[in-house]
Image (cartoon, helix red, strand yellow):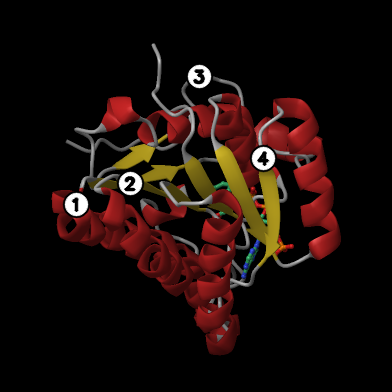
Amino acid sequence: MDLGLAGKVAIVTGGSKGIGKAIAQELAGEGVDVAICARDRRVLEEAAKTLTAATRRRIVPIVCDTTSTKSVQDLVEATVAQLGRVDILVNNASTPGGVVTGPLAQADDELLLEDINTKVVGYMRCAKAAAPHMQRNGWGRIVNIGGLSGRRAGNISGLRNAAIVHLTKTLADQLGASGITVNLVHPGLTRTERTDAEAERRGSSNAIRRIVDAKEIAQVVTFLASTKAANITGVAIDASGGSIPVMFQ
Ligand SMILES: NC(=O)c1ccc[n+]([C@@H]2O[C@H](COP(=O)([O-])OP(=O)(O)OC[C@H]3O[C@@H](n4cnc5c(N)ncnc54)[C@H](OP(=O)(O)O)[C@@H]3O)[C@@H](O)[C@H]2O)c1
């Protein structure tokens, strides 16, 4: 199946490592030029070099902190200046697992606000800056990376993953008339370069009995970003290999 992605331009936030880097590589493999952003310039530039060598596409590293509106506006402007357009936005940048993970008595409200600022408001900031470029072309894709703490209580920082499900459906309804779809992918515990043996074991307690690799999350995201997924919008997809015993109908 030709995904119809050749010649498109994507922004992947948090594209210097882990799932974001795998998404940038998968998109580039389909002929997409990609701007990757993160805060650490050295790691970001190294990732861009590796991805360019692996895919022969233009991979542009742009330092950006998604907690800053100005920084996000600069990211989108720099992408348009260097790659000519923005067709796809993958909102992925955050601290995996969140930073407020203990009991209520130890919950730090400033840290929780930081989590929400990065993942919820950060995703909205990037969508707000990128959407006008997609609207002008009458086509666009926004894919938000969530986490299954959005479907399973127990971790206070998990509320950010529930909030972005709401954001996803709301933006899908607002932007659909402009040819823009907005969807969300929930990874479970996923193999990235920082996965250790214990995480590998925990990640294998899902229905498919093996941890999901970042590349497999990237493949789902790439399909949702493609021309072939025009009829899917406003949904949240569990891509964890069946790691929680609940049904959504
Ligand atoms: N890995 C998992 O098992 C798993 C499971 C469920 C959900 N997720 C979700 O998947 C996404 C990626 O996780 P990951 O495991 O790939 O994380 P990771 O390896 O730690 O990578 C996170 C990326 O986000 C960037 N980042 C963080 N805060 C940022 C900010 N304020 N502005 C710009 N960039 C920022 C980081 O670079 P800098 O630090 O240099 O900025 C890095 O590039 C996250 O949304 C996470 O919650 C992951």
* Mark 1 closeness class: few <14, some 14–19, many ≥20 residues within 10 Å: some
Whole-percent x, y for residue 144 in the image: 42, 51
Residue bearing mark 4: 58
Ligand 1 located in image quadrant: bottom right
Q: CA distance from mark 3 to mark 2?
A: 33 Å
Between the residue at mark 3 and the residue at mark 4, the CA separation in whole angstroms equals 36 Å
Tell which tag, 3 or 2, sits nearer the viewer.
Answer: 2
Of the image marks 3 and 2, the number of the one nearer the N terminus: 2
Of 30 and 117, the residue lying toward us: 30
Name which quarter of the figure residue 115 lies in. Answer: bottom right
Q: Which quadrant of the rendered structure holds the N terminus?
A: top left
Tell me the element at label 4: loop
**Which amino acid lies under the numbered mark 3 shown in the image of this protein?**
Ile
Question: First in sequence: mark 2 or mark 1?
Answer: 2
Q: Verify CB contact (< 8 Å) between mark 2 and mark 1.
A: yes
Which numbered disc flags the more N-terminal residue, 3 or 4? 4
Q: Is residue 204 visible?
A: no
Q: What residue is shown with label 3?
A: 208
Between the residue at mark 2 and the residue at mark 4, the CA separation in whole angstroms equals: 19 Å
Question: Of helix, strand and loop, which one carries label 3?
Answer: loop
How many angstroms separate mark 3 from mark 1 (CA)?
Answer: 38 Å
Residue type at mark 4? Arg
Q: In which quadrant will I find the C terminus? A: top left
Residue behind label 4 places its C-beta within 8 angstroms of ligand 1 = no
Which mark is first along the chain, 4 or 2? 4
Mark 3, other Cα within 10 Å: few <14 / some 14–19 / many ≥20 = few
**Amino acid residing under circle 2:** Gly
Q: Is residue 172 above or below residue 27?
A: below
Label 1 CB less than 8 angstroms from ligand 1: no
Dot 1: element = helix
Q: Position of residue 27 (x, y in %)?
A: 55, 33
Occupied quadrant, residue 239: top left
